[in-house]
Image: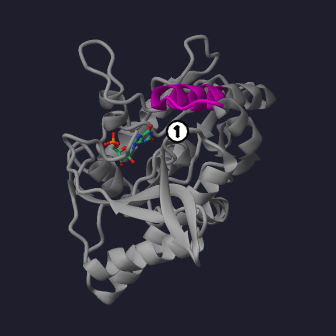
Amino acid sequence: MRDPESFRTEAVERLRAAVPGQALVAASGGIDSTAAAVLAKQALGPRARALFVDTGLLREGETDRVRRISEALKLDIEVVPAAETFFAALDGVTDPEEKRRRIGAAFIRLFEREAKQTAADRLVQGTIAPDWIESGGQLRDTIKTHHNVGGVPKDSTLTLVEPLRDLYKDEVRALAVHLGIPEAHRQPFPGPGLAVRVIGPVTEARVRSARRANAIVEEEVDRAVDAGTLARPWQYFAVLLPVRTVGVLGDNRVWGEAVSVRIVESIDAMTATAVAPPAELLRRIAERITRELSGTVPRVLYDVTDKPPATIEWE
Ligand code: XMP
């Protein structure tokens, strides 16, 4: 990307050429899709209808945040409640690639249904370069199928329009700042949401635990950043692991699952380094997770692996 303003002008022109009629915009509240939504609104005005799908797999407070962003940027984002659909689609699924395929398919089916209302035949998405590079195809190996790429069914009636396809995360951030998007430096969150942060089966109870653990990690990292003991890391989150591990609660042994905490530095998500956090931060995170998820999560681990060999997310 040469500079954000010339990218913006060209993207708006390309969007007008790519969308002759009505479009839907998939707005997740993340930086990528918000930037795509702003460009689509600038290019298409009322011909672009932005939808936020509440999958039930999102971070705490996400729907309210999206409403605030929508107001601030005048995006008129509509909230579509769909938790039941997504939990039903994921019922009994443990394979990470299958989770992404099911989530991608559920998104597309929902958008196809919504598209009928305005006779839209285009779907604008905030896909960025690492999404399709890591999703493989042709000569590349699949590292993981990003839900917004490999998860799109072949028979979909919607044609995808992806204005940010060639950008990397650092470039999207520069664009987002230029477009006036609030919290343009907010950490990334995977499109399949907490479904890929609960390893193994995706049940409502396990997702609830993962949601709280992720909120605790965010709150404690914020606190450490405010206190000056940690530079704002690139990404920081928690993953619920399907291991049966023992703990003590009062005088009793209790069985539960473990949570792994991951904090990484990166520039473009293609490589990443595990951060060595202050001991006090880890101690606070472990204390809060085991207390607030008492009886469910008796053990907290810290992931010290770089990317490569690991990826940033666990699955
Ligand atoms: P990985 O785990 O592949 O992640 O090293 C690189 C970056 O992408 C995010 N991520 C995803 N984002 N759909 C997305 O929109 C996905 O399926 C997905 N998987 C990973 C991850 O959080 C990291 O920032």
In this view of the protein, which residue sits in the foreground, 82 or 91? 91
Q: Residue at x 29, y 66 (%)?
A: 233
- From the image, give the main secondary structure of the stretch colored magenta: helix
Q: Is residue 123 left or right of residue 76?
A: left
**View extreme (bottom): residue:** 227
- Residue identifier under label 1: 200
Q: Is 235 situated above or below 127?
A: below
| Res 185 → quadrant | bottom left
* Residue 163 at x, y percent in the picture: 42, 35
In this view of the protein, which residue sits in the foreground, 115 or 55? 55
Quarter containing the N terminus: top left
| Res 47 → quadrant | top right
* Residue 21 at x, y percent in the picture: 64, 26
Q: Residue at x 25, y 42 (%)?
A: 310
> Could you tell me if residue 177 is visible in this image?
no
Q: Is 212 situated above or below 10?
A: below
Q: Is residue 227 left or right of residue 52?
A: left
Q: Which residues are magenta?
A: 92-108
* Residue 277 at x, y percent in the picture: 25, 72
* Residue 269 at x, y percent in the picture: 27, 47
Q: Is ligand 1 within 8 Å of the beta carbon of the residue shown at mark 1?
A: no
Label 1 sits on what residue type? Gly
Q: Is 157 situated above or below 192?
A: above
Quarter containing the C terminus: top left
